[in-house]
Image: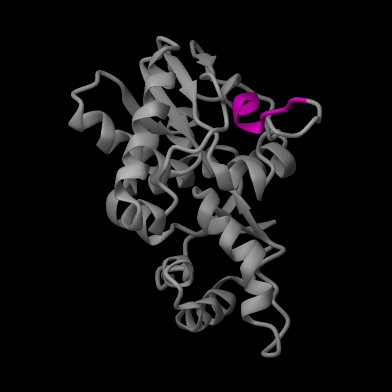
């Protein structure tokens, strides 16, 4: 199978190490991965800000660049969810949207398609797991706590393949961290307080690190933690899975 690696703009600009780790991990697993150099934003920021029509040309470009791949894999639950859920509607009437059904977050791809069950990297630390909202309720990476369904967590399943790691979860394991894209800009005080509350719960676990599947949530919490001089670090889950490979 041919995999197109999609690295969202904020990952490319602020967290390039996450993109590198994703590529390294996929190649380590013997997968055929290609990174189209002329890729660009998926259009989520424009749509979230209320300018959805400006996201349409970006959706069309994404469709042109990635439609030839069997799977489109990205280290970002929010961008993946935007492509999967919104592209069919944005491109309706223009042509059939092929990329929406192929787009997958790297966690669900490794868990559901590759079905990784071999040891991965080494990370001898206590890690608190952050379940991002898009991942829980739009991509199904873990079970929503508000639903009476059997408990599962695909992120935790993969982390258990890492040597030396201890994975814990905070109280209210899938409560929002307060980022929410434009919400953090338009409701700054509420967003910051939600971030402080979430970090406090992560720190109560005694973890050295917080990990999760979306850099935007980790970025928000890391900024709040720095302002409070809190001794806790943040790493994208794919960085931990690839550590030491």
Residue 97 percent coordinates (x, y)? 69, 76
Residue 202 percent coordinates (x, y)? 43, 20
Task: Return the residue nearer the eye: 233 or 7.
Answer: 233
Using the image, determine if residue 26 lies above or below residue 145: below
Which residue is rendered at x = 40% and y = 36% of the image?
Answer: 194
Report the predominant secondary structure element of the magenta stretch.
helix
Using the image, determine if residue 186 lies above or below residue 153: below
Residue 49 percent coordinates (x, y)? 42, 69
Residue 67 left/right relative to 15: right
Using the image, determine if residue 60 lies above or below residue 176: below
Q: Quadrant of the C terminus?
A: top left
Residue 132 percent coordinates (x, y)? 53, 40
In the rendered image, residue 152 lying in the magenta stretch gets the answer: yes
Residue 65 left/right relative to 227: right
Q: Please identify the residue farthest to the right as the structure is shown.
A: 149
In the rendered image, residue 94 lying in the magenta stretch gets the answer: no
Q: Quadrant of the N terminus?
A: bottom right
Q: Can see residue 244? A: no
Q: Which residues are magenta?
A: 151-158
Which residue is rendered at x = 39% and y = 27% of the image?
Answer: 197
Indicate the quadrant where residue 207 lies. Answer: top left
Q: Can see residue 158? A: yes
How was the colour assigned to the protein in this rendering? one colour
Task: Return the residue nearer the eye: 178 or 155.
Answer: 178
Indicate the quadrant where residue 82 lies. Answer: bottom right
Residue 103 left/right relative to 129: right
């Amino acid at each position: 199978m041919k995999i197109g690696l999609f690295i969202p703009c904020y990952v490319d600009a602020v967290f390039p190490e996450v993109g590198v780790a994703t590529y390294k991990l996929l190649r380590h697993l013997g997968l055929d991965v290609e990174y189209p150099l002329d890729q660009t934003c998926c259009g989520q920021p424009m749509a979230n800000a209320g300018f959805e029509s400006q996201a349409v040309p970006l959706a069309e470009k994404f469709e042109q660049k990635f439609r030839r791949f069997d799977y489109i894999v990205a280290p970002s639950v929010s961008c993946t969810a935007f492509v999967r859920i919104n592209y069919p509607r944005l491109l309706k009437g223009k042509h059939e949207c092929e990329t929406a059904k192929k787009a997958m977050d790297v966690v669900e791809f490794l868990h559901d398609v590759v079905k990784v069950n071999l040891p991965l990297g080494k990370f001898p630390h206590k890690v608190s797991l952050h379940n991002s909202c898009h991942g829980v309720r739009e991509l199904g990476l873990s079970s929503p706590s508000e639903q009476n369904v059997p408990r599962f967590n695909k992120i935790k399943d993969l982390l258990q393949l890492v040597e030396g790691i201890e994975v814990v979860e905070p109280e209210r394991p899938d409560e929002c961290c307060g980022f929410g894209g434009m919400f953090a800009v338009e409701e700054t005080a509420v967003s910051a307080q939600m971030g402080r509350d979430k970090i406090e719960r992560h720190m109560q676990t005694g973890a050295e690190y917080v990990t999760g599947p979306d850099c935007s949530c980790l970025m928000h919490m890391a900024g709040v933690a720095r302002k409070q001089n809190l001794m806790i670090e943040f790493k994208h889950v794919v960085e931990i899975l690839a550590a030491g490979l």
